[in-house]
Image (tube, rainbow, N blue to C red):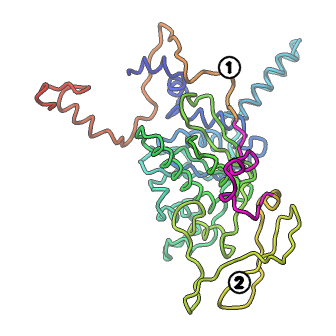
């Protein structure tokens, strides 16, 4: 499919080139921000440190650069300014009102860059540099990425004479927002693609748990499969609010959506470790932390004291740790949500009848929100191009496409779509 045909069939592909975006996915982040105000346009100091995972080719990082560093109006701020202009136009009945509206438009167009902005972008593929953004080529599923991320976030915390291990540095400054637009190279086997996508989501989430500040936000791509409710429930254990967003620039025929998690609750892991220690012992996927083993080889276990009284709705419950190496030990276990205690049942859910096991009250379904103006372009529609339309080249061609070798071989053979100078014998 040529550029002209793709311009007609994909409006956002055409708009991305016209508005100098590296990819059409930039509109997805912009439309999500319109709904959820990810960048806090009224309180700029709340979002100044952002991590972009699976960033290549850099469209989401480009949005971060233009909104946070350069101060351009996109997303919620642009939507608010548009509504203000419309209200001013309706209210301006005389020339004075028109002049005031013009002055207001000039103020709205003023760039508002933020101070002390730190943005780190990570991807396994190389990415062209962007202004004010630290770019890392690393694998988010590998533990070796952790020290690289921490060094990029706080370079002053590392000393050239010390090791780069996360345990040798101080706690990093927390991050306000973590976003991830990562997706696997789809194979067409939907169950396999959904599984690999969920593992990418868990890898991004594990990194977010170690660097997000309390109350921070997390946005990631997700494929809506059969058992996606499990992922929603797991996200809700560490976030106060979880929503599923479907931007208008995302094709309706696609199963992709974006989980928008707000109000991060730092979990107390095992012995109360948080931050960097949380990166060593991932909660969701990855290697599990080892159990406490005494000198005689016995493994300690933690059980609930049946004599302890728990008040309904309490956020903290007292438990006793029973170990073979010592007496009873008191510790605190936190309920992340107020209804956590009231929803717990003595009988395991797996042992209940099928009709009760899959009852509505035993499921938690997050709100599904369509983002973007309904009057905007439809990503599934085809549009007629004007006669003088000129197809533009992509803003940033792929720096190291995995199909580069295939293109070189096709060029050497002197043909395309299986047609070569060697003919049918060469193809065989």
> What is the crowding at mark 1: few (fewer than 14 residues within 10 Å), some, or many (at least 20)?
few
Which callout, 2 or 1, points at the residue further toward the start of the chain? Answer: 2
* Disc assigned to residue 216: none
- Tell me which residue sits at (73%, 90%) in the image: 327
Pick the front one: 359 or 125: 359
Q: Is residue 406 above or below residue 349?
A: above
Q: Is residue 187 above or below residue 218?
A: above
The residue carrying mark 2 is 322
* Residue 192 sits inside the magenta stretch: no
The residue carrying mark 1 is 375
Query: Residue 258: x, y in percent?
Result: 61, 41
In this rendering, position of residue 395 left or right of residue 279? left
* Residue 363 sits inside the magenta stretch: yes
- Tell me which residue sits at (82%, 56%) in the image: 339
Q: CA distance from mark 2 to mark 1?
A: 62 Å
Q: Residue furthest top?
A: 387
Query: Residue 40: x, y in percent?
Result: 74, 44
Q: Secondary structure at mark 2?
A: strand
> What is the crowding at mark 2: few (fewer than 14 residues within 10 Å), some, or many (at least 20)?
some
Pick the front one: 220 or 345: 345
Residue 116 at least partly seen: no
Q: Quadrant of the N terminus?
A: top left
Pick the front one: 345 or 11: 345
Span of residues in magenta: 343-368
Query: Residue 321: x, y in percent?
Result: 72, 81
Closer mark to the observer between disc 2 and disc 1: 2
């Amino acid at each position: 499919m040529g550029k002209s045909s793709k311009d007609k069939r994909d409006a956002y592909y055409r708009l991305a080139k016209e508005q100098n975006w590296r990819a059409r996915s930039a509109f997805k982040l912009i439309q999500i921000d319109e709904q959820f105000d990810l960048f806090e346009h009224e309180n700029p100091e709340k979002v100044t440190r952002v991590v972009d995972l699976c960033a290549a080719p850099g469209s989401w990082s480009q949005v971060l650069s233009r909104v946070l560093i350069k101060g351009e109006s996109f997303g919620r701020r642009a939507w608010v300014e548009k509504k203000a202009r419309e209200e001013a136009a309706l209210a301006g009945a005389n020339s004075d009102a028109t002049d005031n509206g013009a002055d207001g438009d000039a103020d709205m167009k003023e760039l508002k860059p933020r101070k002390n902005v730190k943005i780190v972008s990570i991807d396994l593929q190389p990415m062209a540099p962007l202004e004010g953004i630290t770019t890392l080529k690393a694998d988010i599923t590998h533990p070796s990425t952790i020290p690289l991320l921490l060094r990029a976030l706080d370079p002053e915390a590392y000393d050239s004479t010390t090791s780069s291990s996360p345990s040798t540095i101080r706690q990093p400054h927390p991050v306000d927002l973590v976003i991830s637009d990562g997706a696997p190279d789809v194979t067409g086997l939907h169950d396999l693609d959904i599984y690999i996508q969920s593992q990418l989501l868990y890898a991004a989430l594990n990194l977010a748990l170690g660097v997000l500040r309390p109350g921070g936000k997390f946005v990631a791509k997700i494929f809506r499969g059969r058992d996606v409710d499990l992922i929603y429930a797991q996200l809700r254990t560490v976030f106060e609010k979880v929503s599923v967003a479907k931007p208008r620039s995302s094709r309706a025929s696609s199963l992709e959506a974006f989980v928008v998690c707000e109000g991060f609750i730092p979990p107390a892991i095992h012995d109360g470790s948080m931050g960097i220690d949380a990166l060593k012992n991932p909660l969701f996927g990855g290697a599990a932390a080892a159990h406490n083993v005494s000198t005689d080889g016995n493994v300690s276990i933690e059980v609930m004291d049946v004599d302890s009284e728990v008040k309904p709705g309490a956020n903290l419950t007292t438990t006793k740790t029973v170990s073979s190496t010592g007496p009873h030990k008191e510790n605190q276990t936190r309920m992340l949500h107020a209804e956590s205690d009231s929803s717990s049942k003595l009988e395991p859910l797996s042992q209940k009848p099928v009709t009760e096991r899959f009852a509505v009250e035993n499921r938690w379904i997050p709100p599904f929100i369509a983002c973007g103006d309904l009057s905007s372009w439809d990503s599934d529609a085809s549009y007629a191009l004007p006669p003088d339309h000129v197809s533009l080249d992509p803003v940033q061609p792929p720096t190291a496409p995995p199909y580069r070798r295939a293109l070189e071989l096709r060029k050497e053979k002197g043909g395309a779509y299986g047609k070569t100078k060697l003919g049918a014998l060469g193809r065989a």
